[in-house]
Image (cartoon, rainbow, N blue to C red):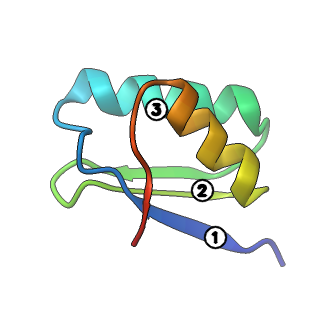
């Protein structure tokens, strides 16, 4: 079973932000299940936590433990 990681990304404020984060995670973690809830600023994904966190940071956002 693959563990799901959840981050709060409070500087994700619009659909463009969400799309950028989704694309970064899908590139860094091929095949990962990515879920984004813009209203609550939550991003969840399956796969390597460190790689996912780095992908969000590299996209210009600040993931925080949710």
Assess disc 1: are there few (<14), some (14-19) or many (≥20) residues with their C-alpha within 10 Å of its C-alpha. Answer: some
Q: Give coordinates of residue 17: x percent, y percent.
A: 30, 27
- Residue 21: which numbered mark, if any? 3
Could you tell me which quadrant the C terminus lies in?
Answer: bottom left
Reading the image, the residue beneath label 2 is 45
Asked if the residues shown at circle 3 and circle 2 are in contact, with their CB atoms under 8 angstroms apart, the answer is no
Q: Is 37 left or right of 29, judged from the image as shown?
A: left
Residue under the point 33% across and 50% down: 9
Q: Is 5 left or right of 41, judged from the image as shown?
A: right
Q: Secondary structure at mark 3?
A: helix
Asked if the residues shown at circle 2 and circle 1 are in contact, with their CB atoms under 8 angstroms apart, the answer is yes
Mark 2 to mark 1 CA distance (whole Å): 5 Å
Reading the image, the residue beneath label 1 is 4
Residue under the point 24% across and 50% down: 10
Could you tell me which quadrant the N terminus lies in?
Answer: bottom right
Assess disc 3: are there few (<14), some (14-19) or many (≥20) residues with their C-alpha within 10 Å of its C-alpha. Answer: many
């Amino acid at each position: 079973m693959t563990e799901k990681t959840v981050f709060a990304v409070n500087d994700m404020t619009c659909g463009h932000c969400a799309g950028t984060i989704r694309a970064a995670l899908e590139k860094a973690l091929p095949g990962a299940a990515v879920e984004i809830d813009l209203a609550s600023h939550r991003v969840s994904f399956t796969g390597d936590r460190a790689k996912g966190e780095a992908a969000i940071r590299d996209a210009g956002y600040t993931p925080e433990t949710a």
